Amino acid sequence: MTRVVLPPLPRATTAPRTAPDAASRPTAPARRAGRLTVAPTPREVARSLAGQRWEPLIEFREPRWYRRVAEGPGWEAWLLSWLPGQSTGLHDHGGSAGAFAVLRGAVDEVLPLPSRPDSDDAEAGRTRLARRRYRAGQVRAFGAHHLHDVAAGGELAVTLHVYAPRLVSMTRYALVDGALAVTSREREGQDW
């Protein structure tokens, strides 16, 4: 595994900056050597790491391939490869915020959403799935309570995922009769 040191962020002179993905900020501001510092968001780490040369590490295979490739204070990064048809299944990140950068190809993120307010009575109260495609060069950030499925977009793909704090558990879900149901819980050191 590679330990990566990111370039320092600009010094904060007043209150910490607010970013669109501030909810996914891994830690609160801290004082170091008399300066106020702000930890990088998973989005910032993913963008920084996405430019590195990862090709020599990548394997395309069944079952889906993944590898922890970097870590830093309060975060870790994983490289994932995708064959057409592979997906993660619906899962959360055990309270970790995160981001993924698409390095090659495209992936689809599937999100469980409540039914629309204008739905007919048969759909009221049911969970539906919405899909969005992310292509090479795009980064998707998410908060600590995010639930999704990520799937190959019909071609070979590579993604880089950053979690803060490091990923220690995941819960897997299925959509059963319009409602989310827990199917399993996984823990670091036991299941990956």
Image (cartoon, rainbow, N blue to C red):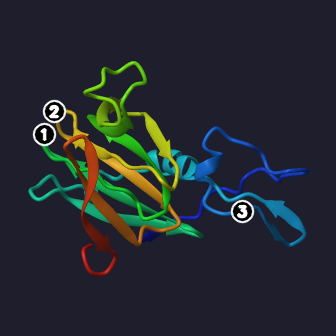
Q: Which quadrant is the C terminus positioned in?
A: bottom left
Q: Earlier in the sequence, mark 2 or mark 1?
A: 1
Residue at the extreme left: 62
Give the residue number, with chain letter if any, for mark 3: 28
Q: Which three-letter amino acid code belongs to the residue tagged 3? A: Ala
Q: Secondary structure at mark 3?
A: loop
- Disc 1 crowd rating (10 Å Cα; few below 14, some 14-19, many 20+) is few
Q: Position of residue 134 (x, y in %)?
A: 35, 32
Label 3 vs label 1: CA separation? 39 Å
Depicted 188 relative to depicted 141: above or below: below
Could you say which disc has been placed on residue 84 in the image? 1
Q: Earlier in the sequence, mark 3 or mark 1?
A: 3
Numbered disc in front, either 3 or 2: 3
Q: Position of residue 187 (x, y in %)?
A: 32, 75
Q: Are marks 2 and 1 in contact (CB under 8 Å)?
A: yes
Q: Which three-letter amino acid code belongs to the residue tagged 1? A: Pro
Question: Residue at the location (28% across, 28% down)?
Answer: 123
Answer left or right for 64 relative to 52.
left
Give the residue number, with chain letter if any, for mark 2: 154
Q: Which three-letter amino acid code belongs to the residue tagged 2? A: Gly
Q: Position of residue 61 (x, y in %)?
A: 11, 55
Residue at the extreme front: 121
Could you say which disc has been placed on residue 174 in the image? none
Which residue is more in the foreground, 38 or 173? 173
Q: Secondary structure at mark 1?
A: loop
Q: Quadrant of residue 154?
A: top left
